[in-house]
C-alpha cells in the first residue's frame, strides 16, 4: 500500500517536472516581477503554434534575491530553468561559471539585429554573446525649470546653482544616491567614467582606478560637503531622491526615467517645470549609469532550441513595445523608440537615446557583486572621502575581490 | 575480566551500533571534512578555471577582515544579551508554570505558543510590526522613525524577537529542574526561618544548577548560530550580520565556497569552544553522561 502511494507520488512528481506535455516543449522563464510579462508570454505562445509553451516564473522583487535564487538553482544543475532574466551586471559571473549558453549562428544574429550598441555590450563577455538584451535604462539629470533657467552640465554647475538657490532661500538640493548600497558604486562608476577613467581594466582582470578616479573622489567629496548636498545624502537611495524632488525640498536629482511618470501621478503641479538633461559630468556632459535586463539560456535547459526561440520572441520589437508602454521599461531595439505611443509615455526618449551612446557600463567582472559591495562600503559616507587614502583603500579591496579574497558583509 | 560470552556480547553490541555510526559519519562527518577541505582551496564558482590548494590563506583572509569581526561581535552581543534576558524571564515563567494551581494545562500551553510558531513566520510578523506606515509597533514611535534601518535599533529588535521566541524553551528546561527540588527540603528550610528569597538562592538554585547549565548551554549554542530572525529582519544590512549570515552571504550570495567554508569551520570551532567551556569550566553535565 505504502509502496503504491510512493510510486504514484514519484510518478506525479516526474510528470510535474516533465519537459513536455503532449509534445509541446515547456520553456520555463524566470524573470523579475513585471506586470505584463504574462501578456507578452501569451503572445509568444500563440505565435509558437505549439512548438513551445512559455511558463512564467516570478523571481523575488530585489535584485539580490533574484540573483540568489538563480545561482542556487544553477549551481545545483536544475533542469527546470530555461530562459533567465538577468540584470546587466550578472553576465560575466554566470558566463564564467559556465551556467549560461553562448549565443551563436542565427540566434546571435537575430539578437544583435537592430539592437542598440551599449545594451548589447552588457550581454558580451570576453568577446562572446551570452544573452539577448531585453530592456535598458539610463539615469538623467532632472531639474526644476522654475528654479534654474538652464540645466547645469557638470557637478560643479549643480553646486554653483545650489549655492545661489540656497542664498535666495529656495529649494537647493541636488539629490544623488549616496546611501551605502549599489547606487553609490554606480554613482562613483559614472563620475570616474566622466573623468575619463574606469574601475577595472577593459578585460576585467585588474584594477584600473588611476588619476581619473582620484579626481572623481575629489568631486564626490566636494559635492557631499556643498550646498547641493541634502543633509540625508548618506541615506539617500533612488526613491528618497525622487521623493525629495516631489516633496519640493530639492531642485535637482540624478535618477532613472521612472521619476517622470511618478511626478505626473503625484505632483501634476510641478510637472510643467520638471525637465531633464544629460547626466552631469566633470569637464562637460557626463556618462550616465547604464541599467537594464537581458535574457540568457541556462546550460541545464533540456530543450535549448525552443528556449532560444522563446527568448527571441520575448524580446522582439512587439514584446519590447508592450514592456515599454505598459511597464515603463525602455527598449533595447532602436526602432521601437519611433513607435507613435512612445512620444506620449517617453517625452524624454531622445535624451535616453543620446545618453545610451555615451553611457558608462559597470565594471565587467565575475566578482561584480564583491566589487560593488566594497566600493559602497569604502565610499560611505561620501562626505568622509579623503581622496588619496580612499583611493588606496579601494585599490586594495577591489584587488582582493578579484583574487577571490573579497569578503561580503 | 570479560568472559567468552561477554566478548561475544560486545561484538554484537558493536555490530548493532554500526549502522547508526555509519549513518552519522555519512551525514555529519563527511560534510564537516568536505567543508574543511574546501576551506583550504581557492574554490570560487565564479572562477572554475582557477581552483587550487592555497593552504590557510582563506583563514588569513577571513580573520584579517573587518566584516568578519563585526559579525562576530554582533553575534556575541546578541548571544549574551538574549541568553541573559531569557534566563531571567525563563526562570520567572518556569516558577509561574510550576506553582500555578488553577488552569495549569492552559497556562503551560499558552506560554509555549511562541515556541510553536515557525521562526521565519514570527520574524515576518516582527518585521511588518516595525515597518513604518503599516506596523502597529512602528506607529507607536515618533513620525519618520524606521528602526530596522539603523544598526542599534535593528539589533535590539533581533534580540527582542529571539527572546520572545525562545524564552518558553528556556522555561521548559528550567521547570524540569524545579521538579528536582524536593518539597520537604523547602518546608524544612522554612521551618528553620529561611525566607522566600533565601530558600530560592540557597536551596532551589544550587539544586537546579545542572538543569540551568544545560539550558544555558543549549540556548548559547543556538543563539550563536542565529540565522532566520536576522535573515528576515535585516538580512545583515547596517552591520547586523551574524556569523551564520555572513557565511551564507559568501557561500550562496558570493559563490565563494572557499571563504564560505572557512567561515563555517570557524563557526564550528567557536561552537566547540562554547560547549567545552560549559562542560569543563562550569561543569555542565554533557547530555547523555552519568549524573554526578
Image (cartoon, coloured by chain):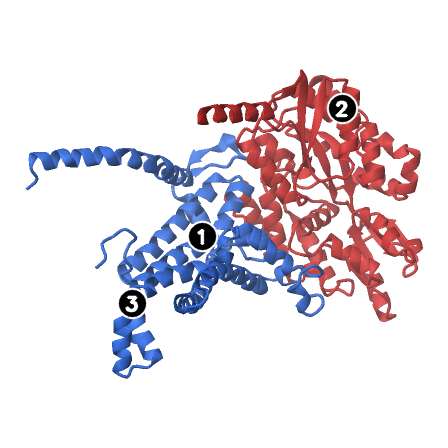
Chain colours: A red, B blue
Q: CA distance from mark 1 to mark 3?
A: 32 Å
In the image, A63 versus A403, the foreground residue is A63
Element type at marker 2? helix
In the image, A259 versus A59, the foreground residue is A59
Marks 2 and 1 close (CB-CB < 8 Å): no
Eye-nearest disc, 2 or 1: 2
Which residue is painted at 58% across and 26% down in the image? A79
Q: Which residue is mark 1?
A: B225
Which residue is painted at 90% across and 61% down in the image? A147
Res B202 → quadrant: bottom left
- Up/down of A110 relative to B60, above or below: above
- Residue A236 on image: x %, y %: 71, 58
Q: Which residue is mark 3?
A: B181
Which quarter shows the C terminus of chain B? bottom left
Identify the mark at residue A45; answer none if there is no mark: 2
- Residue B97 on image: x %, y %: 42, 65
Q: A42 left or right of A86?
A: right
Identify the mark at residue A14; answer none if there is no mark: none
Element type at marker 3? loop
Chain letter behind tag 1: B
- Up/down of A300 relative to B79, above or below: above
Eye-nearest disc, 3 or 2: 3
Q: A249 left or right of B132?
A: right
- Residue B113 on image: x %, y %: 50, 57
Marks 1 and 3 close (CB-CB < 8 Å): no
In the image, A54 versus A377, the foreground residue is A54
Q: CA distance from mark 2 to mark 1?
A: 47 Å
Eye-nearest disc, 1 or 3: 3
Res B18 → quadrant: top left
Amino acid at each position: 500500500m505504502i509502496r503504491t502511494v510512493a510510486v504514484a507520488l514519484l510518478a506525479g512528481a516526474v510528470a510535474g517536472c516533465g519537459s513536455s506535455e503532449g509534445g509541446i516543449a515547456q520553456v520555463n522563464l524566470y524573470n523579475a516581477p513585471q506586470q505584463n510579462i504574462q501578456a507578452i508570454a501569451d503572445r509568444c505562445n500563440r505565435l509558437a503554434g505549439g512548438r513551445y509553451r512559455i511558463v512564467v516564473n516570478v523571481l523575488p522583487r530585489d535584485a539580490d534575491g533574484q540573483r540568489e535564487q538563480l545561482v542556487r538553482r544553477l549551481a545545483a544543475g536544475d533542469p527546470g530553468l530555461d530562459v533567465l532574466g538577468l540584470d546587466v551586471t550578472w553576465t560575466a559571473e554566470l558566463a564564467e561559471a559556465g551556467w549560461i549558453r553562448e549565443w551563436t549562428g542565427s540566434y546571435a544574429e537575430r539578437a544583435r539585429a537592430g539592437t542598440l550598441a551599449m545594451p548589447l555590450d552588457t550581454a558580451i563577455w570576453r568577446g562572446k554573446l551570452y544573452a539577448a538584451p531585453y530592456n535598458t535604462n539610463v539615469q538623467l539629470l532632472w531639474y526644476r525649470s522654475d528654479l534654474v533657467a538652464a540645466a547645469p552640465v557638470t557637478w560643479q554647475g549643480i553646486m554653483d546653482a545650489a549655492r545661489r538657490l540656497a542664498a535666495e532661500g529656495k529649494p537647493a538640493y541636488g539629490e544623488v544616491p549616496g546611501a551605502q548600497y549599489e547606487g553609490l558604486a554606480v554613482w562613483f562608476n559614472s563620475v570616474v567614467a566622466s573623468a575619463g577613467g574606469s574601475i577595472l581594466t577593459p578585460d576585467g582582470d585588474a584594477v584600473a582606478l588611476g588619476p581619473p578616479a582620484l579626481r572623481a573622489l575629489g568631486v564626490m567629496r566636494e559635492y557631499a560637503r556643498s550646498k547641493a548636498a541634502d543633509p540625508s545624502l548618506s541615506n539617500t537611495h533612488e526613491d528618497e531622491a525622487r521623493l525629495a524632488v516631489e516633496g519640493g525640498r530639492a531642485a535637482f536629482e540624478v535618477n532613472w526615467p521612472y521619476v517622470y511618470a511618478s511626478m505626473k501621478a503625484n505632483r501634476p503641479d510641478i510637472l510643467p517645470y520638471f525637465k531633464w538633461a544629460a547626466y552631469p559630468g566633470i569637464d562637460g556632459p557626463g556618462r550616465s549609469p547604464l541599467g537594464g535586463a537581458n535574457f540568457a539560456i541556462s546550460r541545464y535547459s533540456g530543450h535549448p532550441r525552443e528556449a532560444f526561440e522563446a527568448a527571441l520572441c520575448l524580446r522582439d520589437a512587439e514584446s519590447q513595445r508592450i514592456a515599454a508602454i505598459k511597464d515603463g521599461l525602455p527598449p533595447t531595439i532602436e526602432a521601437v523608440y519611433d513607435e507613435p505611443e512612445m512620444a506620449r509615455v517617453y517625452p524624454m526618449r531622445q535624451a535616453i537615446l543620446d545618453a545610451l551612446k555615451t553611457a558608462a557600463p559597470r565594471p565587467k567582472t565575475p566578482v561584480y557583486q564583491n566589487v560593488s559591495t566594497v566600493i559602497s562600503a569604502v565610499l560611505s559616507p561620501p562626505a568622509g572621502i579623503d581622496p588619496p587614502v580612499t583611493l588606496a583603500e579601494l585599490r586594495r579591496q577591489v584587488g582582493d575581490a578579484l583574487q577571490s579574497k573579497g569578503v561580503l558583509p | 575480566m570479560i568472559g567468552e560470552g561477554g566478548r561475544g556480547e560486545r561484538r554484537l553490541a558493536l555490530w548493532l551500533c554500526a549502522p547508526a555510526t555509519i549513518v552519522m559519519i555519512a551525514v555529519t562527518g563527511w560534510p564537516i571534512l568536505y567543508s574543511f577541505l574546501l576551506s583550504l582551496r581557492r574554490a570560487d564558482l565564479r572562477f572554475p578555471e582557477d581552483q587550487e590548494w592555497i593552504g590557510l590563506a582563506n583563514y588569513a583572509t577571513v580573520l584579517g577582515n573587518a566584516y568578519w569581526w563585526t559579525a562576530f561581535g554582533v553575534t556575541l552581543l546578541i548571544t549574551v544579551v538574549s541568553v541573559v534576558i531569557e534566563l531571567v524571564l525563563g526562570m520567572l515563567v518556569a516558577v509561574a508554570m510550576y506553582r500555578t494551581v488553577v488552569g495549569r494545562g492552559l497556562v503551560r500551553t499558552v506560554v509555549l505558543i511562541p515556541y510553536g510558531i515557525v521562526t521565519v513566520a514570527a520574524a515576518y510578523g516582527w518585521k511588518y510590526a516595525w515597518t513604518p506606515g503599516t506596523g502597529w509597533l512602528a506607529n507607536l514611535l515618533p513620525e519618520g522613525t524606521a528602526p530596522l534601518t539603523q544598526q542599534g535599533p535593528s539589533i535590539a529588535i533581533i534580540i527582542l524577537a529571539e527572546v520572545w521566541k525562545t524564552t518558553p524553551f528556556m522555561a521548559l528546561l528550567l521547570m524540569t529542574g524545579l521538579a528536582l527540588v524536593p518539597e520537604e527540603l523547602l518546608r524544612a528550610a522554612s521551618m528553620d526561618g529561611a525566607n522566600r528569597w533565601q530558600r530560592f538562592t540557597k536551596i532551589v538554585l544550587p539544586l537546579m544548577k545542572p538543569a540551568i547549565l544545560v539550558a544555558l548551554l543549549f540556548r548559547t549554542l543556538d543563539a550563536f548560530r542565529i540565522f532566520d530572525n536576522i535573515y528576515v529582519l535585516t538580512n545583515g544590512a547596517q552591520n547586523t550580520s551574524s556569523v551564520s549570515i555572513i557565511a551564507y552571504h559568501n557561500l550562496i550570495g558570493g559563490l565563494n565556497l572557499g571563504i564560505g567554508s572557512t567561515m563555517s569551520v570557524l563557526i564550528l570551532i567557536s561552537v566547540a569552544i562554547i560547549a567545552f567551556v560549559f562542560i569543563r569550566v562550569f561543569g555542565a553535565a554533557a547530555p547523555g553522561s552519568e549524573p554526578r
